[in-house]
Amino acid sequence: MTMRPPLANLNGELMPLDQVKVSALDRGFLFGDAVYEVLRIYKGKPWLLAEHWQRLVQSLAAIRIRGVDLDRLKRRMFETITASGFQEALAYIQITRGAAPRSHAFPVSATPLEFMFVQDYADPYAGKRVAGVAVITHPDLRWQRCDIKSTNLLGNVLATQAAAEAGCAEALLYKPDGTLTEATHSSFFAVIDGILLATPLGSEILPGITRAFLEKLAARIGVPFHEQHLNKDSVTKVSELFLSGTGAEVLPVVRVDGQTVGNGNVGPVTMRLYEAYQQAVKEFASARFGSGTCRRFGLCL
């Protein structure tokens, strides 16, 4: 079946994605002077919208992009989702500092560029959640403010390419001392003695939206959680390992650098968390729009 093309919105104007034109002097293009968010759409509704929106606000503030009407931006996102007709989709939002003569310092005046698109999403991880995936470890080559969701992703790109060339789904990034930080485009969790572990929050990792939601789910189903650094040389000694992200949701890892994790199968804690995640998504997707739904799921405009 042929998938419908993505629908874009550039500064409020709807158009097919392949018709979008952005100035060659846009600072997002020249410098990566931009931030972004990616949201999952279930049944035509953006999942964890309030959390994604708060992170977008924090990213804009961190790199001092001002002048963005966030309420208008949210309305434009809903208009684009509705006009696209997609029910199961991804929404990508990117804000750049705008176009200006090329100079490293902030321009005296520039209008932020607001770009987004919505595309159909056929979950590529469905089968992989049953058998689990393999990952590699790779040096973390990124800058020191990974807590900002910026478009400066060259380090992520190089590590992802290394994983692809190794026939793996992802790369776990590590610092010079071997400390693991996160994966190239997802967070990761480990399980040791029934305790769920994740990298402590800080400037070295992105505060994952799915990660935070899974922490809440863990508390709800009685799985203890603790922030703790792991080392790449000991990661295969954990009993379970999985990735989390907007697209991946919960993705079990069964091999790291060719070595088996646990018994090589998807672990019970991972399965419980994914079942709880599926149930939460099901409740969200089946809920009708209304004031109660708006408040509960952060969908208020």
Image (spheres, rainbow, N blue to C red):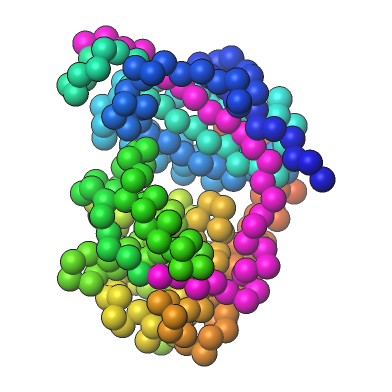
User: Could you tell me residue 141's position as x and y percent?
Assistant: 26, 55
Q: Which residues are magenta?
A: 108-136
In the picture, which quadrant includes the N terminus?
A: top right
Q: Residue at x 35, y 61 (%)?
A: 182
* Residue 235 position (above or below residue 26): below
User: Could you tell me residue 131's position as x and y percent?
Assistant: 62, 76
Tell me, yes or no, if residue 292 can be seen here. Answer: no
Q: For this rendering, which residue is in front, 68 or 261?
A: 261
Q: Is residue 179 left or right of residue 149?
A: left
Q: Residue at x 24, y 70 (%)?
A: 179
Outermost residue on the front side: it is 165
* Residue 269 position (above or below residue 53): below
Is residue 89 within the magenta segment?
no
Is residue 123 within the magenta segment?
yes
Q: Residue at x 29, y 13 (%)?
A: 100
Q: Is residue 84 left or right of residue 243?
A: right
* Residue 243 position (above or below residue 232): above
User: Could you tell me residue 93's position as x and y percent?
Assistant: 49, 32
Q: Quadrant of residue 290?
A: top right
Q: Residue at x 60, y 26 (%)?
A: 17
Q: For this rendering, which residue is in front, 15 or 288?
A: 15
Tell me, yes or no, if residue 143 can be seen here. Answer: yes
Q: What is the total number of numbered labels drawn onto the structure image?
A: 0
